[in-house]
Image (tube, helix red, strand yellow):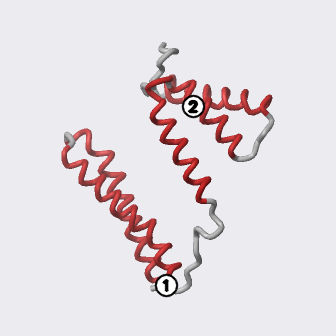
Amino acid sequence: MNKSKLINLTMPAFFIVFFALVVYATTSMAPTEAVFPRMVGVFSLVVSCFQFYFDIKKKDHKDKFQGCNVLKVLEATAVLFLYIFLMKKIGYVIDTILLSFYTMFALGYRKIKVAVPVAVILTLIIFFIFKVLLRVSLPMAFFDF
């Protein structure tokens, strides 16, 4: 098995293990609470198995990660972990505005006079959808209403 084929098989293999663990985790949940996570887990597990099978059968493998900036990927992952960590500390609104602004800046957009209002408007739109329309409880910290 060549290096490109092994690289292409890593993601489906990871997702097979991950979604098998998700399905296993639903066994300790109450039956009514486990329905949706189990459905998503089983569906995703089946899709991952199909992807793994098709990647094994494929003759020509191209390295999907060639030219990938690993440091940018690690930076984005670290920022998402920081976002999750700060969510309960500073609340959804401030945290999401900062993440939106950072994302635009990291993607190369440097017009701050446009980026700040876009980050605020994007956060408010998402807030309206989840908090008002869908009535999802969001960590608010300072702006609880």
Residue at image point 26% right, 44% down: 34
The label on residue 2 is 1
Is residue 127 something that shows in the picture?
A: yes
x and y percent of residue 40 in the render? Answer: 36, 52
Q: Is residue 96 left or right of residue 81?
A: right
Q: Who comes first in sequence, dot 1 or dot 2?
A: 1
**Dot 1: what SS?**
loop
Question: Would you identify the image quadrant in which residue 35 lies?
Answer: top left
Residue at image point 39% right, 63% down: 14
Number of marks in the rendered image = 2
Q: Nearer the viewer, residue 104 or 49?
A: 104
Badge 2 crowding class, 10 Å Cα cut-off, few under 14, some 14 to 19, many 20 or more, is: many
Q: Nearer the viewer, residue 74 or 133?
A: 74
The label on residue 96 is 2
Is residue 128 something that shows in the picture?
A: no
Image quarter (top left, top right, bottom left or bottom right) of the N terminus: bottom left
The label on residue 102 is none
Q: Nearer the viewer, residue 126 or 5?
A: 5
Amino acid type, residue under disc 2 in the picture: Thr
x and y percent of residue 79 in the render? Answer: 55, 41
Residue 135 versus residue 27 in the image, above or below? above
Residue at image point 37% right, 69% down: 49
x and y percent of residue 123 in the render? Answer: 61, 29
Q: Nearer the viewer, mark 1 or mark 2?
A: 1
**Dot 2: what SS?**
helix
CA distance separating discs 1 and 2: 42 Å
x and y percent of residue 90 in the render? Answer: 50, 23
Amino acid type, residue under disc 1 in the picture: Asn
Q: Residue furthest top?
A: 145
